[in-house]
Image: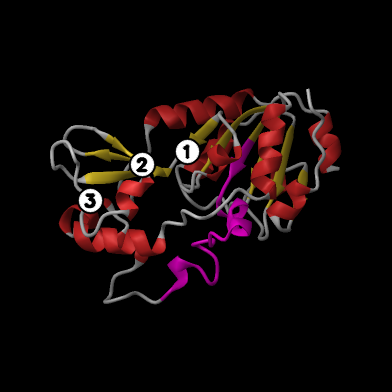
């Protein structure tokens, strides 16, 4: 049935979460064995350490945690990423709206990507706005400093307590509102404000692919509880 929906769709948007990247070796941080299920260290939960306030108050500890627990530079796109890129290459995909910060959609070749929570591959100086790649964070110790002005280099990721970029959100909602098919893949739809983006969908077909049930299951035309990489990797996309 999924193949039939894709074959008869002209304007698809994929809304993705952590479940799309688990086959690439990046853990689902909110899963039962994920980072956010671990016991707090020194009374600090991951949400506390990855917050805007903690970043400003304890930047060195923030970066120690960020480097060791949030970065997976060797991860490669999996079958799900490749299938989503194939949809774009075939002219069927209007865009990817992702909650992931791993950058794997872009590495797979997708250009129409709305990274709602940012990307670990993009970093900037908080003083002069100089741009740095991921290697700047990986190649430094303690607090990474700008080579131009000495300012703190901050990852372009949305920390707890920070608002996502409004233009990214506006673009994501615009694409969702204009698509005829929305494929929700690998997300529990529990994180706001991204989860509320589905309210903008008024198209014909809603597909949900996730291991666990989601709040969108009841309104979806098709619900598949399974591995996202296996499901999307099994579709066939005709070349243009």
Of the residues tagged 2 and 1, which is closer to the observer? Answer: 2
Of the residues tagged 1 and 3, which is closer to the observer? Answer: 3
Asked whether residue 48 appears in the rendered view, the answer is: no
Q: Residue at coordinates 82% horizontally, 39% vertically from top-left?
A: 236
The quarter holding residue 139 reads: bottom left
Q: Give me the C-alpha separation between circle 1 and circle 3.
A: 23 Å
In front here: 203 or 39?
Answer: 39
Q: Give me the C-alpha separation between circle 2 and circle 3.
A: 12 Å
Kind of element beneath mark 3: loop
Q: Is residue 116 left or right of residue 68?
A: right
Which is more N-terminal, label 1 or label 2? 1
Kind of element beneath mark 1: strand
In the rendered image, residue 20 lying in the magenta stretch gets the answer: yes
Give how far across and how far down residue 95 sits, in percent. Answer: 60, 30
Kind of element beneath mark 2: loop
Q: Which mark is residue 115?
A: 1
In front here: 93 or 72?
Answer: 72
In the rendered image, residue 134 lying in the magenta stretch gets the answer: no
The quarter holding residue 32 reads: bottom right
Question: Badge 3 is on which residue?
Answer: 144
Question: Badge 2 is on which residue?
Answer: 133
Q: Residue at coordinates 24% horizontally, 44% vertically from top-left?
A: 153
């Amino acid at each position: 049935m999924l193949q039939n929906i894709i074959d008869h769709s002209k304007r698809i948007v994929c809304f993705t979460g952590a479940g799309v990247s688990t086959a690439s070796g990046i853990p689902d941080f909110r899963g039962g064995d994920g980072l956010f299920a671990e016991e707090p260290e020194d009374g600090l939960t991951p949400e506390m350490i990855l917050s805007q306030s903690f970043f400003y108050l304890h930047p060195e500890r923030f970066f120690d945690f960020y480097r060791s627990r949030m970065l997976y530079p060797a991860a490669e796109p999996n079958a799900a990423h490749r299938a989503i890129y194939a949809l774009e290459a075939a002219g069927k995909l209007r865009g990817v709206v992702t909650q992931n910060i791993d950058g794997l959609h872009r590495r797979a070749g997708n250009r129409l990507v709305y990274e709602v929570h940012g990307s670990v591959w993009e970093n900037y100086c908080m003083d002069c706005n100089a741009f740095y790649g991921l290697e700047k964070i990986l190649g430094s110790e303690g607090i990474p400093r700008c080579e131009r002005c000495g300012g703190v280099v901050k990852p372009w990721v949305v920390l707890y307590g920070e608002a996502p970029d409004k233009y990214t959100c506006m673009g994501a909602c615009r694409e969702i509102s204009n698509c005829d098919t929305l494929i929700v893949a690998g997300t529990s739809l529990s994180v706001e404000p991204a989860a509320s983006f589905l309210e903008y969908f008024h198209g014909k077909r809603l597909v949900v692919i996730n291991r666990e049930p989601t709040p969108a299951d009841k309104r979806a035309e098709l619900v598949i509880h399974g591995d996202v990489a296996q499901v999307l990797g099994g579709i066939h996309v005709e070349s243009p």
